[in-house]
Image (spheres, coloured by chain):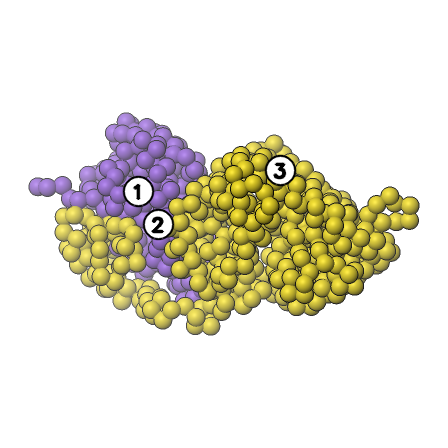
């Protein structure tokens, strides 16, 4: 079923929607049909990122559907050496998403899992090898999809302040993605971006690595947080919630005032709620 | 050797993180190697093409390694040298010891060689009453400290110069105790004077090899101190000890690899010395060794040839993956408890010594992928670490708690309805538990996270729960 239920507030700017925020039939036909892969971390920790992604996709002219039979891309199993479960999860994801024109995830890490690793994980599976390749080829990280596929070069959003951007390793190295989030951020009213040093260095999250080797993971994070502080930015943005939870957790433990948000929230203008790991405002 | 083992990884890493001196020394990796490599690469526009070429030529060589080894052996014999095949480390030790004994050696000089470290050669020679003097400055320092190298090209990267000065005062006897060793040139001068003595008296010189060339039967070493040349040419016997994957077909191929090696490692365009040795001194040569031996070590390599880890045999030991690894940068080389630390060591160590002996090494990586990115031989290091994790998991070696958690999670993740029922219940509960603070400073069952950082709390309901509501009265 085509998504029609985004709250009017979110969908009001989208072209091709009628006055009730519903997709007009003729517009629906021409629009790329996107299956949103919410990601397990967004689902659990920060649903606002998912709604921000829907809004951005609709505004940019896509139709969006969020299949309910999705859980996780399987990385926790895959990266722990549990190939069997990773493969089973990958098959379900493929079955769920292959009917869409595109799969879009608000995460470079999950998008890279689909794009880069599914094809190799299922390379020897006669039923799924080709389907994994096909799905991989049409799977995108959110900002790169907006820029590279939908041709978006600006968003209508406002965010006051100086931010810095953290590239996740999977975005940077597996998806070769650096430009798209920065290009969109450059169009946000009131926002200025100051690059920190060593943007190409890992924050130390690494999924299960962060709890299997917490001291090493945190030592790497500490160097990252130093660079964030040196940038002078008041807000850290990133496209991956894993990195964000990790960095935000370190910053708040250190008593830092720097806030962390997912880039989609800022691009979509959904910034009313508290930043990641921050207290709810009184009242 | 300090006796550390990969099995002590977690404890060693914790010690390394708490070692302020080590942490200060490790900053040099960042300041030095990373920036220098980037500059060297930027000045060579064809770097990536060269990398593809080098990768292809190594793959080709490995595919036909038997043929190239035979060709190489023929050429060494033609040039008057001898080749000894050593299936195991013990074989290699015995072969070298016998050559030394036959030469009546009481002192051998050594150029830097990771393979000689791998087989534990020094201890073996010393046990037989033969002094083995390391002549590379870094190797000399760790030898007097009784340590293993902490980096494959910079053995003492874990030390600061003040610590080295203390070692020199302690170990270099017969010199004034109050001499000044505060500047690096003082240290170099003292080591140089001491080592000159060794160079001219040693009966045997042992070097490693960065490359072996099948076309000519030559061995190639790269150094920045010239100690390798003195080791190879002054004694009457020169022993080259190298593992079998060092082979390349031609001189041209050797040059392709050399153009990548120094740039990737130290960020130099080329090392100060690049020395080709082919056989013993010929009749009429004014100097050079009388005997030239090559000890070719297998020690597990030929088994790697046919399996998942063959690409690891492309490694040219430049050290770039260590230099760019955030884990290596945080804990240094010794914590790995293996001669081969960092990403290349995380793949190679289990291949040489067994995954049961080194399971932490391929597991202790965030898979950031920078190692593969900077590897001049494009070795897929993260993929191969993942392969080791798979073997580790198949063996049932990860701690029970980890395996159980993973199985439970996977059970739910494969069943979307169950998964959403669980996550839909847990997320709001956890959010409520956090209250208005928005984060946890400690949380039962999440101690591994909250020990070192806060855990941001969930917003409340899961996305899927909220999404269902936004569609509320819509008919399915």
State the residue at coordinates (54%, 55%): B146
State the residue at coordinates (75%, 59%): B105
- Element marked by disc 2: helix
Q: Which mark is residue A262?
A: 1
Structural distance between the alpha carbons of marks 1 and 3:
56 Å
Quadrant for the N terminus of chain B in the image: bottom right
Pair 1/3: label in front: 3
- Element marked by disc 1: strand
Q: Which mark is residue B189?
A: 3
Q: Colour of chain A?
A: purple
- Element marked by disc 3: helix
Name above or below for residue B105 compared with residue B178. below
Q: Which residue is identified by label 2?
A: A218
Q: Colour of chain B?
A: yellow
Q: What's the chain of the residue with tag 2?
A: A
Q: In which quarter of the image is residue B259?
A: top right
Q: Residue B363, percent across and down?
A: 44, 60
Q: What's the chain of the residue with tag 3?
A: B
Q: What's the chain of the residue with tag 1?
A: A
Q: Quadrant of residue A74?
A: bottom left
Q: Residue A57, percent across and down?
A: 33, 42
């Amino acid at each position: 079923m085509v998504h029609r239920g985004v709250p009017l507030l979110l969908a009001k700017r989208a072209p091709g929607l009628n006055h009730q925020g519903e997709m007009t039939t003729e517009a629906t036909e021409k629009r790329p049909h996107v299956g949103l892969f919410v990601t397990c971390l967004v689902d659990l920790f920060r649903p606002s990122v998912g709604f921000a992604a829907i809004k951005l996709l609709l505004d940019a002219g896509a139709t969006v559907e969020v299949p309910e039979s999705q859980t996780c891309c399987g990385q926790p199993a895959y990266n722990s050496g549990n190939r069997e479960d990773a493969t089973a999860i990958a098959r379900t994801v493929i079955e769920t998403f292959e009917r869409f024109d595109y799969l879009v995830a608000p995460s470079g890490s999950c998008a890279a899992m689909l794009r880069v690793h599914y094809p190799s994980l299922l390379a020897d599976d006669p039923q799924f090898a080709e389907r994994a390749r096909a799905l991989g080829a049409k799977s995108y990280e959110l900002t790169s999809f907006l820029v590279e596929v939908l041709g978006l070069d600006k968003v209508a959003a406002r965010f006051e302040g100086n931010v810095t951007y953290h590239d996740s390793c999977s975005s940077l190295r597996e998806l070769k993605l650096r430009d798209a989030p920065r290009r969109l951020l450059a169009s946000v009213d009131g926002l200025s971006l100051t690059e920190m040093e060593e943007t190409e260095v890992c924050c130390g999250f690494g999924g299960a690595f962060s709890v299997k080797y917490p001291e090493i993971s945190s030592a790497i994070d500490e160097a990252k947080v130093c660079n964030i502080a040196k940038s002078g930015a008041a807000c850290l943005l990133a496209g991956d919630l894993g990195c964000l939870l990790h960095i935000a957790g370190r910053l708040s433990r250190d008593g830092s005032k720097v806030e962390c948000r997912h880039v989609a929230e800022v691009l979509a203008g959904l910034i009313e709620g508290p930043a990641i790991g921050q207290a709810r405002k009184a009242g | 050797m300090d006796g550390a083992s990969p099995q002590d990884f977690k404890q060693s890493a914790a010690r390394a993180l708490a070692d302020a001196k080590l942490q200060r020394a490790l900053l040099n990796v960042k300041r030095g190697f990373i920036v220098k490599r980037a500059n060297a690469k930027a000045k060579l526009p064809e770097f990536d093409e060269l990398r593809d070429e080098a990768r292809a030529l190594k793959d080709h060589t490995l595919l036909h390694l038997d043929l190239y080894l035979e060709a190489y052996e023929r050429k060494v014999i033609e040039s008057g040298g001898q080749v000894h095949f050593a299936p195991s480390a013990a074989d290699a030790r015995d072969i070298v010891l016998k050559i030394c004994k036959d030469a009546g050696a009481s002192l051998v000089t050594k150029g830097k060689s990771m393979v000689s470290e791998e087989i534990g050669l020094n201890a073996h020679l010393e046990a037989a009453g033969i002094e083995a003097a390391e002549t590379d400055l870094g190797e000399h320092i760790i030898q007097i400290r009784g340590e293993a190298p902490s980096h494959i090209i910079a053995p003492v990267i874990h030390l600061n110069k003040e610590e080295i000065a203390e070692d020199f005062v302690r170990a270099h006897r017969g010199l004034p105790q109050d001499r000044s060793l505060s500047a690096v040139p003082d240290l170099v001068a003292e080591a140089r004077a001491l080592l000159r003595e060794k160079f001219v008296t040693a009966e045997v010189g042992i070097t490693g090899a960065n490359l072996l060339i099948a076309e000519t039967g030559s061995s190639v070493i790269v150094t920045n101190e010239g100690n390798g040349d003195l080791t190879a040419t002054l004694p009457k016997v020169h022993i080259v000890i190298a593992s079998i994957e060092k082979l390349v077909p031609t001189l041209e191929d050797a040059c392709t690899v050399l153009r990548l090696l120094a740039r990737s490692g130290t960020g130099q365009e080329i090392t100060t010395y690049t020395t080709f040795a082919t056989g013993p001194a010929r009749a009429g040569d004014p100097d050079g060794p009388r005997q030239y031996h090559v000890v070719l070590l297998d020690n597990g390599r030929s088994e790697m040839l046919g399996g998942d880890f063959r690409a690891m045999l492309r490694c040219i030991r430049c050290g770039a993956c260590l230099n760019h690894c955030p884990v290596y940068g945080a804990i240094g080389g010794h914590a790995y408890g293996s001669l081969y630390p960092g990403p290349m060591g995380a793949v190679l160590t289990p291949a040489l010594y067994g995954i049961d002996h080194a399971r932490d090494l391929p597991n202790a990586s965030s898979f950031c992928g920078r190692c593969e990115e900077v590897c001049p031989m494009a070795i897929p290091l993260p993929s191969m670490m993942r392969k080791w994790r798979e073997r580790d998991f198949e063996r049932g070696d990860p701690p029970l708690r980890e395996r159980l958690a993973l199985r439970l999670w996977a059970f739910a993740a494969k069943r979307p309805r169950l998964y959403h029922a669980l996550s839909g219940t847990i997320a709001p509960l956890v959010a409520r538990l956090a209250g208005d603070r928005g984060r946890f400073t400690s949380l039962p069952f999440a101690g591994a996270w909250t020990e070192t950082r806060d855990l941001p709390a969930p917003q409340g309901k899961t996305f899927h729960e909220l999404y269902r509501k936004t569609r509320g009265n819509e008919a399915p």
